[in-house]
Image (cartoon, grey):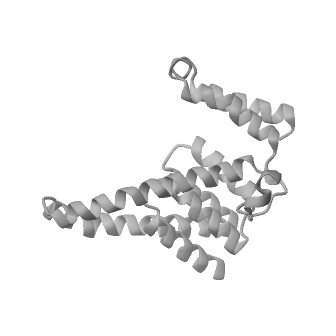
């Protein structure tokens, strides 16, 4: 019961402040794993990989995986509902107010101030995702140590990342290669290299 209450608290807080969509939940999830010890960075990386390939919103998928990992099926229900409650509340309460005051300069300034916060959370998610995806299996949560950060990375993963990144960024290549093929290439390289 204690874990369910903690799941509800953590995911409600995440849903309330993860401005920028499901990807913005990643820094929150990284902190939850560090603070609560419910999962390792590698387990979080696995949750993210599965959530990205599964249908549905990323944040909700993450709530399902973490909730199940921590407290089974009751954890799934609690984490998912707790993550969605702030959004439901915002939709029911704030959205009508925004519509009512859409021409207000105060509302425009407020929305202008939220945009960089959203971009910052998504950038933090990218950094967190790179940390947990490229780290060695025995790396701990303390990847912020500046002087020794390079010792935490599995250089085979870094090579794989650098090899596959152009397939996603170069427009001519990106148009010819389906994303599923890139996922399959990454999975095959992981099996071959024993990652």
In the rendering, at what x and y percent does residue 17 appear?
45, 67
Tell me if I can see residue 33 in this picture. Answer: yes
Q: Is residue 188 left or right of residue 102?
A: right
Q: Residue placed at 55% from the left, 24% from the top?
A: 170
Q: Which residue is rendered at x = 26% and y = 70% of the image?
A: 93
Q: Residue furthest front?
A: 147
Is residue 20 at least partly visible in the picture?
no
Q: Is residue 101 left or right of residue 67?
A: left
Q: Residue at x 63, y 69 (%)?
A: 32
Res. 189 image quadrant: top right
Q: Could you tell me how many numbered marks the image carries?
A: 0
Q: x and y percent of residue 173 in the render?
A: 56, 19
Check the picture and name the quadrant holding the C terminus: top right
Q: Quadrant of residue 147?
A: bottom right
Residue 47 position within the rendered picture, expressed as x and y whole percent measured from the top left? 66, 53
Query: Which quadrant is home to the N terminus?
Result: bottom right
In front of the other: 102 or 151: 151
Q: Nearer the viewer, residue 80 or 123?
A: 123
Residue 65 locus on image (x, y percent):
63, 57
Q: 20 left or right of 167?
A: left
Please report the residue visible at 60 percent of the width from the left and 69 percent of the height from the top.
74
């Amino acid at each position: 019961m204690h874990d369910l209450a903690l799941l509800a608290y953590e995911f409600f807080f995440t849903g309330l402040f993860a401005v920028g969509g499901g990807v913005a939940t990643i820094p929150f999830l990284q902190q939850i794993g560090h603070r609560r010890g419910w999962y390792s960075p590698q387990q979080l990386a696995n949750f993210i990989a599965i959530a990205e390939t599964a249908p549905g919103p990323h944040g909700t998928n993450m709530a399902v995986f973490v909730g199940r990992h921590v407290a089974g099926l009751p954890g799934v229900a609690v984490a998912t509902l707790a993550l969605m409650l702030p959004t439901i509340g915002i939709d029911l309460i704030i959205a009508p107010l925004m519509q009512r005051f859409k021409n207000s300069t105060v509302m425009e300034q407020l929305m202008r101030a939220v945009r960089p916060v959203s971009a910052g959370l998504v950038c933090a998610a990218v950094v967190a995702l790179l940390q947990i995806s490229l780290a060695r299996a025995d790396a701990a949560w303390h990847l912020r140590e500046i002087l020794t950060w390079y010792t935490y990375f599995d250089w085979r993963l870094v090579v794989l990342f650098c090899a596959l990144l152009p397939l996603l960024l170069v427009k001519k290549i990106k148009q010819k290669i389906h994303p599923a093929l890139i996922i399959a290439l990454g999975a095959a390289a992981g099996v071959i290299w024993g990652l």
